[in-house]
Amino acid sequence: MNIVTAKRFTIAEYHRLAELGFFAEDDRVELIKGEIIQMAAKGKPHSVCNTRLSRELFKIIAGKATLRGQEPIILSNRSEPEPDLVIVHNRPDDYLQEHPLPSDVLLLIEISDSSLKYDQEEKISVYAEAGISDYWIFNLVDNFLECYSEPYQNLQGKFGYRRKLIFLPNESVNLPYFNDLVLDLSKVFPSV
């Protein structure tokens, strides 16, 4: 009996496909657990939230760390996602030598509407397994911020986060690692 299995790619193979022109210039893809995943198209609320969040984080971080938007991070030899935003340690080369690794990440952020279920169920385990200590989802379906922290592995080998806190769009939240820095969510969530 033949069993069909999907080809899982390494980061090197994924980059080689890109070099060979396998992806169109406007293709939005990322590598997750060896699979090439087509990223969801961004609607207006997603774009507005991303713009506002980038603007606010840039102001409050003010050089204390580096803010990267939709740029790759290396989680393993088979996962190179491109989160909506990530706050990483400052480095003199601005990550020219290599993309950030989990140890560089202070906060990883996804903005979710059509991708909400995927971000809550699939990406969350990938980020927890990599040891990303703080993962936020700007949930545009339910209109609140989901803050996950304390990654763990359960007895069945699955990864997740021990803590989940919800913040409403009219509240403020402290940034991890920078407890004196506060993000006013009313300046981030799109108004309806």
Image (tube, rainbow, N blue to C red):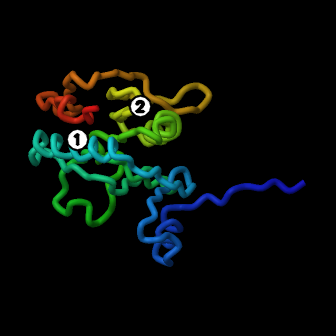
Quarter of the picture holding the C terminus: top left
Foreground of the two, 95 or 146? 146
Query: How packed is label 1: few (under 14 Cα within 10 Å), some, or many (20 or more)?
Result: many
- In the image, is 134 to the left or to the right of 91? right
Location of mark 2 (residue)? 141
| Residue 149 visible in rendering | no
Foreground of the two, 176 or 53? 53
- Residue in the picture at 26% in, 66% down: 96
Quarter of the picture holding the N terminus: bottom right
- Under circle 1, the secondary element is helix
Identified by mark 2, the residue type is Val
Question: Where 129 falls versus 79 (above or below)?
Answer: above
Residue 84: horizontal and vertical position, in percent?
34, 47
- Residue in the picture at 40% in, 54% down: 74
- Under circle 2, the secondary element is loop
Question: Where 152 falls versus 92 (above or below)?
Answer: above
Disc 2 or disc 1, which is closer to the eye? 2
Residue 153: horizontal and vertical position, in percent?
51, 30
- Residue in the picture at 36% in, 41% down: 110
Q: How many marks?
A: 2
Query: Which label belongs to residue 185?
Result: none
Location of mark 1 (residue)? 53
Identified by mark 1, the residue type is Leu
